[in-house]
Amino acid sequence: VDEKKRLLTECNHTATDILQAILRKEYGDSVKQAGSYVGSDFLTFDCFFQKNLSNEEILNIEKNINSIILNSYNVDYRNVSYDDAVKDGAMAFFTEKYNKDNVRVVSIGNVSKELCGGTHVNKTGEIGLFIIKEVKTVSSGTKRFVCLASDRAYDEYEKWKDVINYSISSFKCQ
């Protein structure tokens, strides 16, 4: 296993769960996952979501997620029956995929609790930085969030910083 790729994937997977929790907290339980991609390079999160987000709202979502990252919440795992997990408040969006006798519940501090079999960081602080690169409509009522976490988010930040510094220098403004 390539340790660097694994860590970046863990960061993106945990960030995906945090993104979902923040969207549901801010915009309600009607926000439901419709799919995702989690790799070492970036993440996408597709969800049923009617609202078009302003730039200010996107920045607020990022701010809330980065606050959770900075608080370095523990990411805990436990295996229980499906019924016990749901009774305890764990989100379960893909009920047909779960073994009823044994499911894995991933809890991120007091932020998120869901059934999830993927790889995660041990503390949210390991993610480092989170950026929403794009939000687009992929079908009627379904939005796709394209996001960067960890090193990839920092690389993107550095690009933006370079563009801003070049613009300031070129136009002689401050």
Image: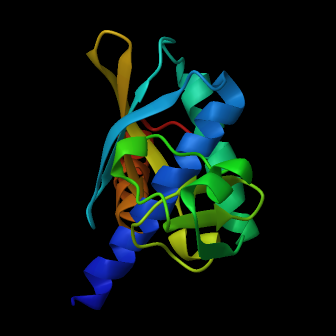
Residue 145 vertical position relative to residue 84 in the rendered view, above or below: above
Q: Position of residue 167 (x, y in %)?
A: 38, 39
Which residue is outermost to the left?
Answer: 1
Residue in front for this viewpoint, 30 or 57:
30
Residue 172 vertical position relative to residue 31 in the rendered view, above or below: below
Residue at the (51%, 76%) spot, across then down: 121
Residue in front for this viewpoint, 60 or 13:
13
Task: Give the left or right position of residue 73, taking residue 23 as reference.
Answer: right
Q: Please tell me in which quadrant of the rendered image residue 48 appears.
A: top left
Residue at the (47%, 72%) spot, across then down: 120
Q: Position of residue 54 (x, y in %)?
A: 54, 17
Q: Position of residue 172 (x, y in %)?
A: 45, 38
Residue at the (52%, 18%) spot, across then down: 53
Q: Position of residue 20 (x, y in %)?
A: 54, 42
Q: Please tell me in which quadrant of the rendered image residue 98 appears.
A: bottom left
Task: Give the left or right position of residue 82, taking residue 162 as reference.
Answer: right
